[in-house]
């Protein structure tokens, strides 16, 4: 444990800041936005401090904290930072201030809007850093509360339905997971992920759950699986996503696609795979096909959309399914498979890079689409055209984000997808080949969107109404745009954070 509780500060500064905002009633809107932005940026400061302390050569947790919380139930407030959690809190630190800056200019309660985003930011950080199920689950569920109100109060014409559907799906999935962990605790006496992982490695977790019977063991596995699958979402648990993404205000859409969806994938990596490797291996033959369905059907569904935000929602399903395709392909391997290191490490590295890089490109695209919608009062592709002639700065930033999402070499989106395909090809070549259909469909709908909306004849509403990015908009998007370019050229900046970890994981799947 470190003497200075830096991980706790990382989580709770935005949350305490949200509380402070409720006690400062006399702040005007400009001051509220500045204070909220500084509080949100605090995470970026802590990430810089953590990078200075972080030892990338370690395969375990480099920084930890542990505090007794409910001794009678052996519940602790345990925190840990490794390469994966550092990657994702770094993504959260970059995306959260962007969401604060999307504060609607009209019909808004600025204080509540900023307060909800600070709570949401803390909840996400808690999920990425907590190592005990009870506090982890509280952060997991806490993220639903501000998300619901952000969609309900600032969303579009169908916001109420979108908010209710989002909460019902995600809380329903969480209920299965809570019951599953109640069963795990009943048989093992611990909620700690590290202890449960060690128990699983030794076979003790399997033996403990075996006393429930094989059927109940499978039910416990499915409970955790469903809770995580809904959050990502994995096909066919995705039906809540297009409506929620399209009806949510711009900031909420950005956070949900860039950060909250990563919470589900993180749960698969941190919880399901380490605790249930055998059951996940047995199910992997089926799960890779579900992930493949998300890759292909998500892209083809995006082709059919005329609403830009719904199109980007299906695009997110497509991109996140690449991550799950990599993970489920890896989980199909056992030491007896005699698989080499190369495909495993490639798939692992691609998965983690895709988590981060998709967050950057998706956030930038949703920001640009939100900017267009706020001025034109429409998101219909058929009603927008010729933006490049009227708003070249907007078109430029949109183009970088779009081609990054497309996987253009030289931008950060390329290397993650390339490594995923390289790894999955070495494990399941037929699956990898079929997944190329998703790549082609993604290229088709993104390039069609680019051609129709930014090029061609300028529509009358664009010509008379649309304004270009201001200096403030340019400064807002410049950091993540530069990162998309930098990480496309030097992906090793991120890979070095988690490379020892994936080498360690790969060694457990390869015969010596």
Image (spheres, helix red, strand yellow):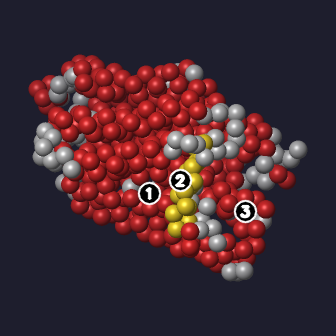
Q: CB under 8 Å between callouts 1 and 2?
A: yes
Q: Residues within 10 Å of mark 1 (few under 14, many from 20)?
A: many
Q: Is residue 445 above or below residue 456?
A: below
Query: Is disc 1 in contact with disc 3, using a CB cutoff of under 8 Å?
Result: no
| Horizontal arrangement in the rendering, residue 331 relative to residue 449 (left or right) | right
Residue in the image at 48% along x and 22% along y: 485
Which of labels 2 and 3 is toward the front? 2
| Tag 2 residue | 130
Answer above or below: position of 499 versus 110.
above
Marked residue nearer the N-terminal end (1 or 2): 2
> Does residue 50 show up?
yes
The residue identified by callout 3 is: 200
Residue pictured at 36% horizontal, 67% vertical: 168
Q: Is residue 414 in view?
A: no
- Return the residue found at the far front: 3
Q: Is residue 402 left or right of residue 58?
A: left
Q: Provide residue 493's location: percent of width, then percent of height.
A: 58, 26
- In the rendered image, residue 119, in percent from the top left (x then y), is placed at 34, 51
Q: Which residue is mark 1?
A: 139
Residue 495 occupies which quadrant of the picture? top right
Q: Residues within 10 Å of mark 3 (few under 14, many from 20)?
A: some
Q: Quadrant of residue 360?
A: top left
Quick one: SS at disc 3? helix
């Amino acid at each position: 444990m470190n003497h200075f509780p830096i991980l706790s500060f990382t989580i709770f500064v935005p949350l305490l800041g949200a509380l402070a905002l409720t006690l400062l009633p006399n702040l005007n809107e400009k001051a509220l936005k500045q204070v909220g932005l500084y509080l949100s940026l605090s995470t970026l400061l802590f990430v810089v401090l953590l990078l200075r302390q972080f030892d990338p050569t370690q395969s375990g947790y480099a920084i930890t904290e542990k505090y007794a919380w409910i001794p009678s139930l052996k519940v602790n407030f345990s925190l840990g930072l490794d390469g994966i959690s550092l990657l994702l809190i770094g993504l959260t630190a970059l995306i959260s201030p962007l969401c604060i800056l999307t504060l609607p200019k009209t019909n808004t309660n600025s204080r509540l809007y900023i307060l909800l985003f600070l709570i949401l930011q803390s909840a996400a950080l808690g999920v990425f850093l907590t190592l005990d199920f009870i506090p982890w689950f509280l952060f997991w569920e806490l993220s639903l509360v501000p998300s619901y109100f952000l969609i309900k109060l600032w969303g579009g014409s169908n916001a109420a339905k979108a908010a209710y559907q989002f909460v019902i799906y995600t809380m329903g999935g969480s209920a299965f997971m809570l019951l599953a962990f109640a069963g795990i605790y009943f048989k093992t006496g611990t909620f700690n992920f590290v202890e449960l992982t060690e128990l699983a490695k030794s076979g003790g977790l399997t033996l403990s759950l075996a006393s429930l019977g094989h059927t109940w063991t499978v039910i416990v596995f499915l409970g955790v699986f469903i809770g995580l699958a809904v959050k990502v979402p994995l096909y066919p648990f995705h039906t809540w996503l297009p409506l929620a993404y399209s009806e949510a205000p711009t900031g909420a859409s950005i956070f949900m696609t860039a950060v909250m969806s990563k919470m589900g994938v993180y749960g698969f990596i941190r919880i399901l795979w380490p605790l249930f490797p055998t059951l996940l291996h047995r199910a992997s033959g089926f799960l890779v096909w579900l992930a493949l369905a998300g890759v292909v059907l998500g892209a083809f569904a995006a082709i059919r959309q005329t609403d830009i935000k719904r199109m980007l929602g299906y695009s997110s399903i497509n991109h996140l399914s690449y991550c799950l395709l990599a993970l489920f392909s890896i989980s199909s391997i056992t030491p007896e498979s005699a698989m080499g290191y190369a495909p495993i490490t490639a798939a692992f590295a691609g998965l983690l890079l895709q988590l981060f890089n998709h967050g950057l490109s998706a956030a930038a695209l949703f920001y640009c689409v939100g900017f267009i919608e706020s001025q034109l009062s429409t998101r219909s592709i058929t009603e927008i055209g010729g933006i490049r002639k009227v708003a070249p700065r907007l078109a430029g930033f949109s183009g970088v984000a779009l081609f990054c999402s497309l996987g253009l070499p030289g931008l950060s989106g390329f290397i993650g997808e390339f490594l995923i395909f390289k790894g999955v090809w070495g494990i399941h070549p037929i699956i990898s080949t079929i997944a190329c259909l998703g790549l082609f469909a993604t290229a088709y709908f993104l390039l069609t969107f680019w051609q129709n909306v930014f090029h061609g004849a300028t529509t009358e509403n664009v010509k008379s109404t649309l304004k270009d990015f201001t200096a403030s908009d340019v400064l807002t998007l410049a950091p993540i745009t530069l990162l998309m370019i930098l990480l496309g050229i030097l992906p090793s900046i991120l890979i070095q954070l988690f490379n020892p970890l994936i080498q360690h994981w790969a060694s457990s799947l390869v015969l010596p």
